[in-house]
Image: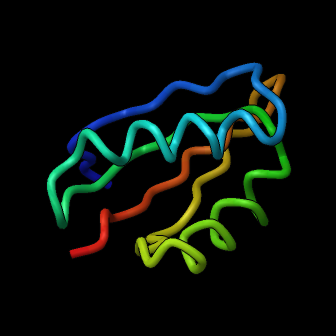
Amino acid sequence: MKANATLDTFGLLCPMPIIKTAQKIKELKEGEILEVISTDEGIKEDMPAWCKSTGNEFLGIEEEKNDPIIYKVYLRKKG
């Protein structure tokens, strides 16, 4: 998926990926896509819930079977 911006939260644990996402999304224009890279498995549940509570659109998640597993989450800024 083509993202307008990428946020690297590699190695950060909950709640930091969500906190960093909330800060980064403010820099984007309405409709732009943010890619969040994380190693925290909790992001699989946390990000869809955060998007639902903030009105941003959760677009999906990809898992790369590395060591550690890398999660790439995509969301669109509301608007």
Q: Residue 77 placed where, x, y %?
A: 31, 63
Q: Is residue 23 above or below residue 8?
A: below
Rendered image quadrant of residue 4: top left
At x 40% / y 37%, what residue is drawn? 24
Identify the image quadrant of the C terminus. bottom left
In the image, taking residue 4 as reference, residue 60 lies left or right, namely: right
Q: Is residue 65 above or below residue 41?
A: above
In the image, taking residue 40 as reference, residue 17 lies left or right, namely: left
Q: Residue 35 placed where, x, y %?
A: 42, 44
Q: Nearer the viewer, residue 1 or 7?
A: 7
Rendered image quadrant of residue 47: bottom right
Q: Is residue 75 above or below residue 36?
A: below
Q: Residue 45 placed where, x, y %?
A: 78, 66
Q: Residue 18 placed where, x, y %?
A: 64, 46
Q: Nearer the viewer, residue 38 or 12?
A: 12
Q: How is the image coloured?
A: rainbow
Q: Nearer the viewer, residue 29 or 7?
A: 29
At x 24% / y 50%, what residue is drawn? 2
At x 75% / y 32%, what residue is drawn? 39
In the image, taking residue 5 as reference, residue 19 lies left or right, namely: right
Identify the image quadrant of the N terminus. bottom left
Numbered disc total: 0
At x 51% / y 43%, what residue is drawn? 21
